[in-house]
Image (cartoon, grey):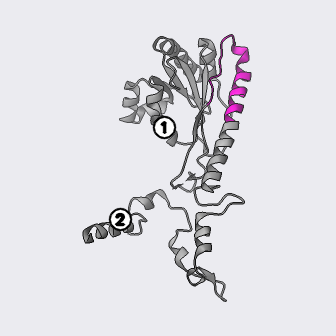
Amino acid sequence: MSADRAMVMVANHQSSLDILGMFDFWHIMDKCTVIAKRELFFAWPFGLAAWLSGLIFIDRRHPQRAQTAMNESTKMLIKKRTKLWVFPEGTRRTTNEIHPFKKGAFHVAVRAQLPILPVVYSSYHTFLDDRNKVMNPGHVIVTALPPIETKGLTNDDIPELIERTRNAMIETFKATTKEVENRFNLSGHGITPAKGTTTVISRIAAAMPSSVRPVNNNAGTIVPGVTSLIEPEPRKIGSLIGGDASPIKEPTAYRRKDVQRD
């Protein structure tokens, strides 16, 4: 990523959170611009700031126009040794897989004979559920794979180049996602234990005296113990920032009392 040379960077696209990851290592890339859909230009003030920063907007409804815009940016990339960041899937999807790639980024790389640098974000499924609007604290591993050279390749080689790049990214995606799941004992949205693992909650419960464990009574209902203080369901985003039932508000109040008492 830190090489002082022009290259085309391709990354899998799961969520708008990908942009936060990009910001986290932007200083390493130094000079980089991004391909963005034209609609974002009209989301002011973000769109104006993005345009002033040099983002390249493309019209996805007109492939020929999009291709022309990307081709025109090639000379600038080479002259200024700038990296071009592209999400070749085109649309963000949190389906725990890497979808087929569009050809635009690969046409640019082959035409300019620039290397392709694949960047892989591990799956967000351990903490993010778009459908149910749930986002828990989570962990992501971002991997920059070795660059794939395109010198000597022609347009006829693009399908094979896309397949080779995507296969390498899928392999890394599966491996890093598995690493996150194993390291934190997760399998989905930050609350469900992975198969064959024991969660922190269950280990705590196992270590508790029987007098405070939740148990089933004869009526088939659960008598709450200490573990009932642990939330059984994922918190929605809004629950973290307001309301009397906020899980953050009460501990903060206790900490303030401790400080005053000390």
Give the quarter of the figure containing the C terminus: bottom left
The magenta region covers 145-170
Residue 161 painted magenta: yes
Where is residue 230? Give x, y as percent. 52, 70
**Residues at circles 2 and 1 in contact by the CB criterion of under 8 Å:** no
Please determine whether, in this image, residue 229 is positioned above or below residue 39.
below
Mark 1 = which residue?
A: 19
Q: Is residue 241 above or below residue 111?
A: below
Residue 11 can be seen, yes or no: yes
Q: In the picture provided, is 254 more to the left or to the right than 225?
A: left
Q: Would you place residue 257 above or below residue 85 in this image?
A: below
Q: Earlier in the sequence, mark 2 or mark 1?
A: 1
The three-letter code of the residue at mark 1 reads Ile
Q: Secondary structure at mark 2?
A: helix
For the stretch drawn in magenta, what is the main secondary structure?
helix
Residue 149: percent from left, percent from top:
65, 18
Using residue 146 as the reference point, say whether residue 38 is left or right of it. left
**Who's the residue at 63% across and 60% down the image?**
192
Q: Position of residue 80 (x, y in %)?
A: 45, 14
> Toward which corner of the image does residue 52 lie, by quadrant?
top left
The span from disc 2 to disc 1 (Cα, nearest Å) is 30 Å
Query: Callout 1: 10 Å neighbours few (<14), some, many (20+)?
Result: few
Find out whether residue 253 is within the magenta segment.
no
- Toward the bottom, the furthest residue is 218
- In the image, 258 versus 168, the foreground residue is 258
What SS does tag 1 mark?
A: helix
Count the numbered circles shown. 2
Camera-side residue of 168 and 16: 168
Q: Which residue is mark 2?
A: 252
Residue kind at label 2, given as amino acid type: Thr
Classify residue 46 by image quadrant.
top left
